[in-house]
Image (cartoon, grey):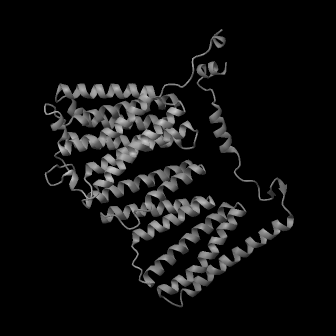
Amino acid sequence: MTESLAIANDNFVDTGDMRQHLAEITPTALPNALEGGEARPARAVRRTGSLGFVVIILWAASLIWTSLGAKAGTSYMHAAYLAFPVFLSSLALGFIGKIHQSPLVSSVGMFSTLAAMSVCGLALNFGLNLHIGAGTLLALAAGVSVCLAVYLNDKTALVLSITYTLVWAGLAVATKALPGGYWLLPAIAATQVFAAIRWPSKPALILASLSLLSLLIAGLYSCVTSGALSAVMAVSLLAGIGLVWNRIGKSMQDYHRFGGLFMTNFGLVVAAFAAIGLQDYWLNPDKLPWQRDEISHLFSYRFLPMWLLVSVLSITAIFITGVLRVRKRKQGWFGVMCMTMLSTFIPLSLILEHTNLALKLAPYLSIDGKPGYILAGIVIGMAMGMLVNGLHRARLSMVVMAFCILCAEAAFIGQFLMQAPDNLTLFALSALISALSAALFARPQFRAPSMETTR
């Protein structure tokens, strides 16, 4: 009977959604006056209160001592000596704020801790001639900040970590090279997203996702400008990572995790616009930055192994998330194979084009431009699925994003469709198959009502 009501009523509340809602509105911590279900002794409360007062006094004293001592010397080591007591007292202040559940005290403590840590790091770097680059210092500061944010549940530390990450990305774009500490940034950005999901906080998740995207774009841009990767290889990586992002969001929705819908839509938007960039490569090969010449061969790039590794990992991740969805009965094997084949098609088409394997396998066929029309149809189909899903969920943001993708795709591909009948046919078939696949992905998961229910 319950299943029939669920089918008939679109506003039926799933038990998983109810559990998620209860988890979000349930307080995450008990009041400080309670411990183990019983009232804490008044002496313990007074002891922690007096300790907090002492810590605040020491923190204020360290600030005064630092401001007065700054006039006594101008060396780098002197600045490090002055900032270190502020670092210790600020760290203690942050812990006191966490114990007493005071967001203001905790935020002030974390902000002054990170500021003092930055001053100490810069002073020691120049004072001891360590020659640590600005990129490495920014990466270390972002790593320490996000660790404090996760441990203390402090949003100020997370915002500072995201700020350090964005500054690092700006430095990479400005210098057109990868600054130091680039091997730390992927783990740091992933931890930022994890912290935002754990709290949960929608603004923090948006900022962390934008931070991760800016890192990817800045890193790929630096690789392209330095000659380590070609532009089309970088865009193909971005498209594959966007698809992985989308599939992870889908799996999060299946397990009723916070932020699953946002991750799904964000990954789809990234993958769609990266796919439009790939279409420009296939349909406008003689324009910058796609200009093909005999010198810029696929196997001449230094980061080719990294490109192959990330592509294989992306395909594997998409397949694994699909298998998890099959186990939850949220998707069929046909959908898993479609998404896996799409993620494989993007790097495989580049390999076939650059190595001339397509001409050896089928000399009578020409692939020039064909992958562009196939990708255009896929983007149209995925955007239509997103539009229908947004209308069904009454989500204006999804409708707007899908409309933007459709407009961008139509504005780009429209000028090429009428050049030859084959182009329009290939595009229409690709869009139809993508739309049907999206409809199969989004089909409702329910069993047929039994005879007892329909009577």
Indicate the position of residue 10 as horizontal and vertical percent values.
58, 24
Task: Report the residue at 20% width, 36% height from top.
Answer: 369
Displayed quadrant of residue 13: top right
Q: Quadrant of the N terminus?
A: top right
- State whether residue 324 is above or below residue 238: above
- The number of discs equals 0
Picture quadrant where residue 452 is located: top right
Which residue appears farthest toward the top when viewing the image? 455
Residue 194 in view in this figure: yes
Q: Nearer the viewer, residue 166 or 446?
A: 446
127 left or right of 361 in image: right
Name the residue: 55% across, 36% down: 254
Determine the image quadrant of residue 281.
top left
Give the percent coordinates (x, y) of residue 387: 43, 31
Q: Quadrant for the C terminus, please.
A: top right
Residue 6 screen position, x and y as percent: 62, 23
In this picture, residue 348 sits left or right of residue 188: left
User: Taking 54 as reference, is 363 left or right?
Assistant: left
In depth, the one of 21 and 66 nearer the eye is: 21
Q: Residue furthest bottom?
A: 72
